[in-house]
Each structure stands twice: as C-alpha cells, then as structure tokens.
Amino acid sequence: MICNQCPRKCNTERTEKGFGFCGVGELPKIARAALHFDEEPPISGTRGAGTIFFSGCNLRCVFCQNYAISEEHHGVVITPYQLSEEYRRLEASGAQNIEFVTPSHYVNAILESLTYYQPRLPLIWNSSGYDSIDTLKRLEGVIDIYLPDFKYSDNALARRLSHCGDYVETAAAAIDEMLRQQPEIKIENDVMQRGVIIRHLVLPSHTKNSIGVLETIARRWNGSEKTENGTRALVSLMAQYMPAGKAADYPEINRKLTKREYHKVLNKYMELNLDGFAQELDSSDKKYVPEWNYDN
C-alpha cells in the first residue's frame, strides 16, 4: 500500500517494517483493547469505554505519555477481521462505546474491520487532531463521536515538540470537518452518542500557548453565537501532563505543571465560558497510564 492517509503524505509503501513517518505497517498493531474508565464522564460512563490503543503515530511528541507504543511501537499485529472480533468482545464486556485511540494511520484496516462486524455502539475517533480531510470524509456516517486534540496555537512550538510545522492550520481544518459531520452534541442517560469534544493538554512553561488554544476554540467552535462556526464542540482541559518520552531533553517541560500555571489557564477557560470538562491537577499520576499488555 502506497500511503497518503494522513497530512504527512509520505507516498511510501507501508510494509510490515513500517516505512513511513508513523513507523508501522498496513495491518493494525494494537497495544491494548480493554474497558477504560479515565475518559471524560460521558465517554467512560459507568461501564467504561471500549478502548483500542493503536501503535505508531503521525506526530512525534517528545513528551508523549504513550511513548512505548507511539514511538517504540509495542503491540501485536492483527488482521482487520481479528480487530472486528475485539469489537464483539468489548461490546459483550459492557462497553459504552468503541474508542479508536491514535487511529489515523489505520483508517483502511478500521473501515475493512467494520465490514465484518458493526458494533451496536457509538464509534469514537480519538486522534491528535492532525488528520487528513480526505481521510475524515471517508469516515462520514461511520464515526459518531470525534475526540481530537488541539495541542498548539503556535506552529514553532508544534515543530519543536511534535515535529510538525503545520499543526495549527491542519488540526483546525480537521476539526472543522469533524464538526461538519457531527454538528450537535447528543447525550442520553449521561452517555455521549454523537458530537465532538476538543481536548487540550496544558504543558509546563507554555501557558501562552494554552491560552491561545482556548481563545481559538472559543472563537471558532465553542462559546456564544458570535463564534465563527457555531456553538457545537465541548472542550476538555487536561492537567495530566507528566514528563515522559524524551521530555528530559527539553528542560522547560521536564517537570509537572505548577498550580499557578494550571490555574492561569483554567481561569482563562472559565473567563471564556467554555462548555465541557476540566481535570483536577492531581490527574498527573502514573496510575492513569494504561498497561500495554494486549495478548493476541
């Protein structure tokens, strides 16, 4: 397969050795498929999200909490049919939904898997936000809930920390497309059925970046009638940052957030009257990092 599924447009063959920026082959490689209870309340619900963590990534965030799978590619290669069997198992386990985590480079396999079994649950696309519009259009009518990150308001910072110099405009366009497909929030019995939640992780030493992100979200996707694209997306402000991956090589992020930093961003969140969720500062704890223990 010559792959141009993400904005990198590597135009290279995705073999089992993973030539291409994401570093993985065409067949899905997964590190965990289990009920997950640490997502936003309407995503986890009371029974947990049926979360599938994919290996590889089209970003290279130096601080990635999931570095062992995003960069080191831990996991097991399975077929699209085997992936569909995971949906059955998670559904039978009581999952509130099926959540694809970091799935952008596996869209072909995911769409094929859904021809074998279509879960009777909402499907969630949990991505970095760095998604191709063409790929997202292939998901129209398939994905019920989009859960993108919006990491940066500064492309220079995106280049330094995620090796991605066009992140801001690319992720913004992707979120526009997600909202075109799912323009309204639908929650039934405290469980989300449709819509978009935009996530933002606050980084230490970079509160200006976070404030810029929140201001962009308020103007473009959340807030009042004066927004560019309507009041449609919920916003999840995350305080869970802790040094991981190669963060030790970047002194300004080689620590947890301070209370002062997080409250500065949280105050802006409240000032902008954003609708959504905000984590507690004590969410920065290794106990919330999943174990990569998928056993095929």
Image (spheres, rainbow, N blue to C red):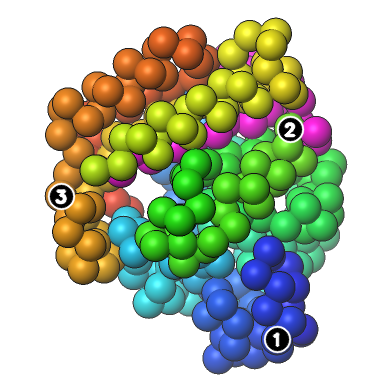
Query: What residue type is disc 1 on?
Result: Thr
Q: Position of residue 2 (x, y in %)?
A: 77, 84
Q: Position of residue 267 (x, y in %)?
A: 32, 16
Residue depth check, mark 2 versus mark 3: number of the one nearer the observer:
3
Mark 3–mark 1 CB contact (< 8 Å): no
Tell me the residue at 27%/23% (across/down).
Answer: 264
* Mark drawn on residue 179: 2
Quarter occupied by the N terminus: bottom right
Residue 193, placed above or below residue 295 = above
The number of numbered discs placed on residues in the rendered structure image is 3
* Mark drawn on residue 255: 3
Residue 196, placed above or below residue 205 = above
Element under disc 2: helix
Say which label, 1 or 2, has the lower sequence index: 1
Q: Nearer the viewer, residue 265 or 51?
A: 265
Q: Relative to residue 41, is residue 171 drawn left or right?
A: right
Element under disc 1: strand
Residue 130, placed above or below residue 192 = below
- Inter-mark Cα distance, 1 to 2: 30 Å
Query: What residue type is disc 3 on?
Result: Arg
Q: Is residue 77 visible?
A: no
Q: Nearer the viewer, residue 4 or 187?
A: 4
Q: Relative to residue 238, is residue 259 drawn left or right?
A: left
* Mark drawn on residue 12: 1
Say which label, 3 or 1, has the lower sequence index: 1
**Badge 3 density bin: few <14, some 14–19, many ≥20, Cα 10 Å:** some
Query: What residue type is disc 2 on?
Result: Leu
Q: Position of residue 148 (x, y in %)?
A: 57, 42
Q: Is residue 209 visible?
A: yes
- Inter-mark Cα distance, 2 to 3: 34 Å
Which portion, as a residue range, is magenta? 180-203
